[in-house]
Amino acid sequence: MKRARFTEEQIIGVLKEATAGAKAADLARKHGISEATLYNWKAKYGGMDVSEAKRLKQLEDENAKLKKLLAEQMLDAAALRELLSKKW
């Protein structure tokens, strides 16, 4: 997976500049991002503080781990069901 270039602190800093009245095109040019990225950030991190953004990242990581564990358990259960259903 591609490594993020910006931390949550940097993203929120850019969004605070946007809410202060800077134009999206100027901000995008200044920080080397596209306007679409800026709008995606605004949709995801809009109105958050740095601590809230860090907590969101932790929850997303935990959720990904849990989904992976669930998928593995479901595969194991399906394999066991298949073994038990075969006629000896």
Image (spheres, rainbow, N blue to C red):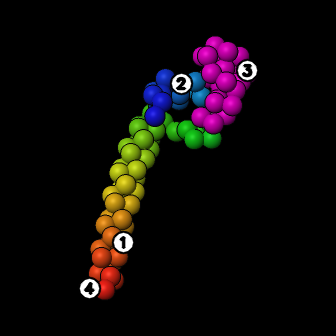
Q: Amino acid at mark 4?
A: Trp
Q: Amino acid at mark 1?
A: Ala
Q: How far is the residue under mark 3 from the one under mark 2? A: 16 Å
- From where the camera sits, is residue 64 visible? yes
N-terminal-most mark, 3 or 2: 2
- The residue under label 3 is 25
Q: How far is the residue under mark 4 from the one under mark 2? A: 65 Å
Furthest residue toward front = 88
Q: Is residue 5 magenta?
A: no
Q: Which residues are magenta?
A: 17-41
- The residue under label 4 is 88
The residue lying at 62 percent from left, 21 percent from top is 33
Secondary structure under tag 4 reads loop
Say which mark, if any, is on residue 14: none
Q: Amino acid at mark 3?
A: Ala
Q: How many circles with numbers are drawn on the protein?
A: 4
Callout in the foreground (3, 2): 3
Residue 79 coordinates in the image, percent (x, y):
33, 70
N-terminal-most mark, 2 or 1: 2
Q: Is residue 27 magenta?
A: yes
Quarter of the image where one finds residue 42: top right
Residue 58 coordinates in the image, percent (x, y):
37, 43
N-terminal-most mark, 3 or 4: 3
The residue lying at 36 percent from left, 72 percent from top is 78
- The residue under label 1 is 78
Callout in the foreground (2, 1): 1
